[in-house]
């Protein structure tokens, strides 16, 4: 079956994506050749974006976070737009994303599960007050709340657990799906990557430029750019 045929015969599709969905919007992923793992930093991203590092070196954490994780100029690309259309057409139930950039919502997707949170949501670690991304961008160094507490992004840092309710919602969609599209993710970050194994159907389409650990489970593998692939779909 082609991707088009799989989609034509489905009406309960789940899309599971990662940083590769946003590279065509100009946001680097982690593990591609020009991804963040291959740029010179004092530590790899999983150290800089860990809870211990945030607590010990908040200033350095925020330098990296502002520089590499916040992309307010980025616009949704063909992949985000095609997925929003698939949802409007009644075919796609949910986008489950590891991304923290809100580009799916910007493209018009209503049903989005953010496994790792969003850089646009932030809160005070002392009083809980909520802040937008401006509080982070406008601060010269570590952003502080008026109560004196450090503000942190509402993203799941390395060494932190995913939110139970968020995971349960993703699990429900994946176990019910009649088709699963996995795209733009190396499937190297756990526990998120394990979730796709809850899908039990026979239409698992994998769109990824490089190999993943789920290739042997896939019913269809497309090694092309996800935006270019999805924009060719006829809905
Ligand atoms: P990753 O490990 O960097 O893997 C990305 C995968 O996408 C690689 O296998 C690439 O080959 C592939 N890829 C890159 N561009 C494309 C493309 N145009 N079409 C198809 N495939 C492509 O990223 P994961 O998402 O798997 O890792 C999970 C981390 C990365 C999550 O915790 C994210 O929060 C984090 N992250 C998010 C963003 C973002 O929000 N845009 C950016 C960078 C990292």
Image (spheres, helix red, strand yellow):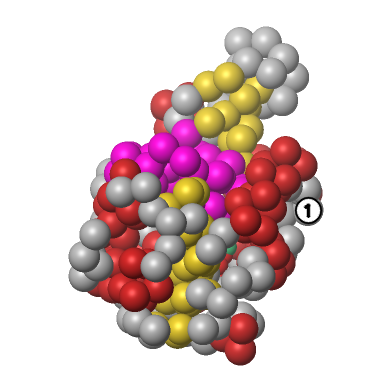
Quarter of the image where one finds residue 225: bottom left
Q: Which quadrant of the figure contains the C terminus?
A: bottom left
Decide: is 125 above or below 20: above
Ligand 1 near label 1 (Cβ, under 8 Å)? no
Q: Where residue 177 appears, x then y in whole percent?
A: 57, 59
Query: 26 left or right of 155?
Result: left
Q: Which quadrant of the figure contains the N terminus?
A: bottom left
Looking at the rendered structure, the secondary structure element under dot 1 is: loop
Q: Where residue 47 appears, x then y in whole percent?
A: 69, 60
Decide: is 155 above or below 196: above
Furthest-front residue in view?
9
Q: Residues within 10 Å of mark 1 (few under 14, many from 20)?
A: few
Q: Where residue 143 appears, x then y in whole percent?
A: 56, 27
Question: Taking the image as drawn, is residue 212 in sight?
Answer: no
Furthest-top residue in view?
147
| Residue depicted at x 54% and y 52% | 96
Decide: is 203 above or below 132: below
In the image shown, does 39 or 15 lie closer to the viewer? 15
| Residue depicted at x 59% and y 36% | 153
| Residue depicted at x 67% and y 58% | 175
Residue 116 counted in the magenta span: yes
Q: Where residue 8 appears, x then y in whole percent?
A: 34, 67
Total tally of numbered discs in the picture: 1
The residue wearing badge 1 is 159
In the image shown, does 47 or 30 lie closer to the viewer? 30
| Residue depicted at x 30% and y 48% | 89
Residue 76 counted in the magenta span: no
Residue stretch rendered in magenta on the structure:
95-120
Question: Taking the image as drawn, is residue 112 in sight?
Answer: yes
């Amino acid at each position: 079956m082609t991707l088009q045929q799989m989609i034509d015969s489905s009406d309960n599709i789940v899309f599971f994506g990662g940083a590769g969905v946003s590279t065509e919007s100009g946001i680097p992923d982690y593990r591609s050749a020009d991804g963040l793992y291959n740029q010179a930093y004092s530590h790899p991203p999983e150290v800089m974006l860990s809870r211990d590092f945030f607590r010990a070196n908040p200033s350095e954490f925020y330098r990296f976070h502002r520089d590499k994780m916040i992309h307010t100029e980025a616009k949704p690309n063909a992949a985000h737009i095609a997925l929003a259309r698939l949802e409007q057409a009644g075919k796609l139930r949910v986008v489950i994303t590891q991304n923290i950039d809100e580009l799916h919502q910007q493209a018009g997707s209503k049903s989005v599960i953010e496994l790792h949170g969003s850089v646009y949501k932030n809160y005070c670690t002392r009083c809980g007050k909520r802040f937008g991304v401006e509080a982070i961008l406008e601060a010269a160094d570590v952003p502080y709340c008026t109560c004196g507490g450090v503000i942190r992004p509402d993203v799941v840092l390395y060494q932190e657990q995913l939110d139970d309710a968020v995971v349960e919602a993703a699990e429900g969609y994946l176990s019910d799906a009649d088709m699963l599209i996995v795209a733009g993710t190396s499937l190297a970050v756990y526990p998120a990557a394990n979730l796709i194994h809850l899908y039990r159907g026979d239409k698992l389409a994998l769109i990824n430029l490089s190999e993943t650990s789920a290739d042997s489970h896939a019913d269809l593998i497309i090694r092309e750019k996800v935006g270019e692939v999805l924009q060719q779909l006829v809905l």
